[in-house]
């Protein structure tokens, strides 16, 4: 309960389907990278806790979000 993707307009927040979420990286530098990317998407300051699988499907994005830990919902 309460777990959702921190990308505001993400489609996965509108569904009750099982969504795989990735928890934020423990590494501070990577975490800040996540935060800046997601804040740019959201046009807001979001404390990023989870990102869903959708944002990792693209190879480039996958590299950008390197260092995540998988957490099954
Ligand atoms: Zn998402």
Image: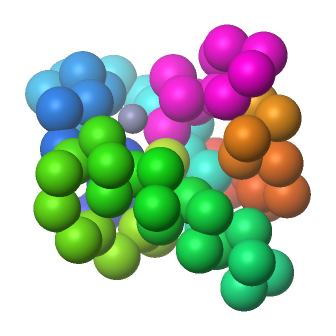
The image quarter containing residue 11 is top left
* Residue at image coords 17%, 32%: 9
* Residue at image coords 26%, 30%: 10
The image quarter containing residue 63 is top right
Main secondary structure along the magenta-highlighted residues: helix
Q: Which residues are magenta?
A: 52-61
- Picture coordinates of residue 67 (x, y %)? 85, 57
* Residue at image coords 43%, 29%: 18
Q: Is residue 4 visible?
A: no
* Residue at image coords 23%, 71%: 45
In front here: 10 or 35? 35
Give ligand 1's quarter of the image: top left
- Picture coordinates of residue 41 (x, y %)? 30, 41
Compared across the picture, whether 1 is left or right of 31 comes to left
Q: Is residue 3 visible?
A: yes
In front here: 7 or 29? 29
Quadrant where the N terminus sits is bottom left
Compared across the picture, whether 31 is left or right of 15 comes to right
Q: Residue furthest top?
A: 58
């Amino acid at each position: 309960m309460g777990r959702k993707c921190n990308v505001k307009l993400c489609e996965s927040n509108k569904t009750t389907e099982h969504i795989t979420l990735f928890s934020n990286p423990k590494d501070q530098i990577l975490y800040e990278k996540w935060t800046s990317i997601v804040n740019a998407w959201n046009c807001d300051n979001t404390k990023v806790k989870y990102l869903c699988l959708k944002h990792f499907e693209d190879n480039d994005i996958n590299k950008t979000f390197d260092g995540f830990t998988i957490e099954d919902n």
